[in-house]
Image (spheres, rainbow, N blue to C red):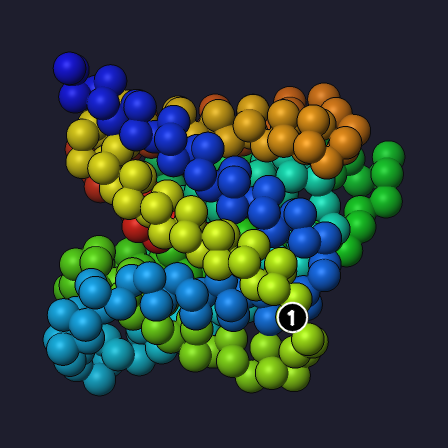
Amino acid sequence: MNQSIVGILWMVITTILFVGVTATVRYLEGEVPAPQAAFLRYAIGTVLLTPSLISLVKIRPEKPLLQKFVLRGLVHSIGVTLWFYAMSVMPVAEVTAIGFLTYIFVSIGACIFLKEKLHKHRLTAILFSFVGAMIILRPGFKIIENGQIGMLMATVVFTASYLIAKIVSKERSSSEIVAMLSIFTTIFLIPTAIYSWEPLSLKAFLILAFTALIATIGHITMTQAIKAAPMVVTQPILFLQLVWASMVGLFIFSEEFDPFVILGGTIIMICVCYVSYREHKLGKKIINDPLQKVI
């Protein structure tokens, strides 16, 4: 079978799994406080990754590099808490659509903090992505709710996490970066999880365990997709997340279909794909390492 087709099929499976993660968290509907839910998801995920973590943690990074790993864990713990909160109060499709902004913010951050050039294609994508975000949020036409603010903040925080990952990727492998992310994010989530801890039902625990399981499998399938075909081929398939999310919201959670969310999310995803295509043509490494997927 053609490798591009193999990569696309792996990415289709990945989009289903990641929307599954979103749906399972949405199903809890705030039953578990966001910090507690985020901690349990990462703690269980870390346990699932134990076989690979054992070999990786033996590699002791130098102090400056370790500081970057610690900083990323702190930043990421804030982001996942915001994401879990947003997911508990917002429609599935809207969370997915706003989440696409992270890729665009990474382009902006890379230009500001990593001194990368702001090529015309990046600037064009940024401007049109802003239009897409305004279509989703519609400020002045409807009240911007706390969940939307939380999700926007999460995309900014995840951007910082991505940029730190890009810096350390010059010195360490993706596997080690993911291992350190799992460990330090879990550690930094402990204080807020303890503070907000509430009695946990067996049902809620099993749902969060399932969330961690399919998220971990999703990382694996996404890695397989990228190994089989270039990001410029597989990344457009990520748009299916918005399709699946809309269907899940409509048919499972009886959420109202919002054409503005679909339109805005489509514009943002087109911009993401355009940037990836142009970066590929320029022969540059695309920032969106699949192993850095936030959930």
For the point 72% across and 59% down, which residue is it? 30
Give the quarter of the image for residue 90: top right
Relative to 289, residue 233 above or below: above
Q: Where is residue 80 drawn, in percent x and y?
A: 53, 61
Q: Is residue 198 visible?
A: yes
Q: Secondary structure at mark 1?
A: loop
Q: Residue furthest top?
A: 1
Give the quarter of the image for residue 282: top left
Give the quarter of the image for residue 207: bottom right
For the point 58% across and 47% down, which residue is it? 24
Relative to 119, residue 75 above or below: below
Amino acid type at circle 1 is Leu
Quadrant location of the N terminus? top left
Q: Where is residue 275 drawn, in percent x and y?
A: 37, 31
- Residue beneath label 1, please? 200
Q: Where is residue 205 drawn, in percent x and y?
A: 57, 63
Q: Is residue 56 left or right of residue 234?
A: left
Within 10 angstroms of label 1, few (less than 14), some, or many (20 or more) residues? few
Q: Between residues 271 and 178, which one lies in front from this camera angle?
A: 178
Q: Residue furthest front?
A: 202
